[in-house]
Amino acid sequence: MFKKQHHVILKNAINPEFAHFLFKYFLMKEQVCYTLKTLKYIPPNCWDYGLFNDTQCDNAFATYGDIAFETLLEQLKPQMEKATGLPLIPTYAYARLYRKGSELKAHKDRDSCDVSTTLFLGGDKWPIWFRIKGKKKYINLNAGDMIAYRGTMLEHGRDPFHGSGGANNLICGQVFLHYNKADKKNKNLYDGRPHLGIFDKSITKNVVMDDK
């Protein structure tokens, strides 16, 4: 399946309860970031705690290189290798909390996102679509499910997010785990950082443009 269509769904990649924990953690991180920036403990353009409205998606809170999510990146690598049939190296984790009006326009990814996942953490469901044989294929996930795909090959996106308007308050939490095929010539290990779990401001211009 992965080799033919360049995507595969992994049901219960993580326990739904663990997904819920990460969703709550992410909501708290957003609240902390907002408070620190409002009180001017950190500058408006500081990425260390996250960013509101990155250049690819308005009305969303995003984080790059979060320690918890990059631990997940390493933890799920064996599952990803089994599902894709490829030896992999981790590049980086990126995550967003989307709200009503968010939209991801059709795009393909940069090199560090060649083998990617989107993992649904919680909130309102919001389908991702892939363009396959000229048509959009929509895929909905449950909390803890993820879909692996070749981000540099498959055009993909999400239609405007409306949510259900229920108790989840029109929020959708997704974490994106990015890998590359292991290769001695591959220079994308850790997305050019010395190790996982840190944010290198010198690559900001690359980070904000090409994530799902």
Image (cartoon, grey):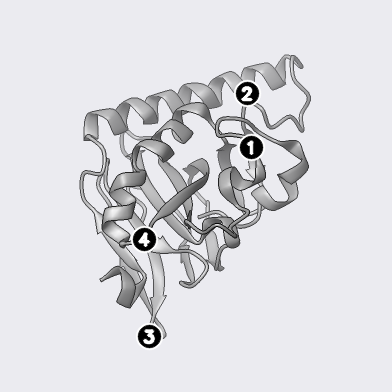
Q: Which residue is mark 4?
A: 86
Residue type at the position of mark 2:
Tyr
**Residue 30 position (above or below residue 138):** above
Name which residue lies at 52% across and 23% down.
Answer: 29
Q: Which badge, 2 or 3, comes first in the chain's sequence?
A: 2
**Discs 1/3, front:** 3
Identify residue for label 2: 34
Instruction: Determine the CA span between mark 4 and mark 3.
Output: 24 Å
For disc 3, the marked residue is: 133
Tell how many labels.
4
Between discs 2 and 4, the one toward the N terminus: 2
Q: Residue furthest bottom?
A: 134
Q: Is residue 39 above or below residue 202?
A: above
Look at 49% across and 72% down and name the residue there. Answer: 155
Within 10 Å of disc 3 (Cα), the crowding (few <14, some 14-19, many 20+) is few
Residue 210: where, in percent of width, then height?
Answer: 60, 57
At label 1, which amino acid type do we have? Answer: Phe
Side of 83 where 96 appears, left or right? right
Front one among 44 and 150: 150
Q: Position of residue 59 (x, y in %)?
A: 58, 44
Q: Quadrant for residue 87, please give it.
A: bottom left
**Residue that extends furthest to the front in the rendered view of this protein:** 184
**SS state under label 2:** helix
Q: Nearer the viewer, residue 130 or 7?
A: 7
Q: Alpha-carbon distance for marks 1 and 2?
A: 9 Å
Q: Are marks 1 and 2 in contact (CB under 8 Å)?
A: yes
Label 2, label 4: how far apart the Cα atoms are: 39 Å
Does residue 165 appear in the picture of this structure?
no
Give the mark toward the camera: 2 or 3: 3
Marker disc for residue 17: none
Disc 4 marks a residue whose amino acid type is Leu
Disc 4 to disc 3: CB gap under 8 Å: no
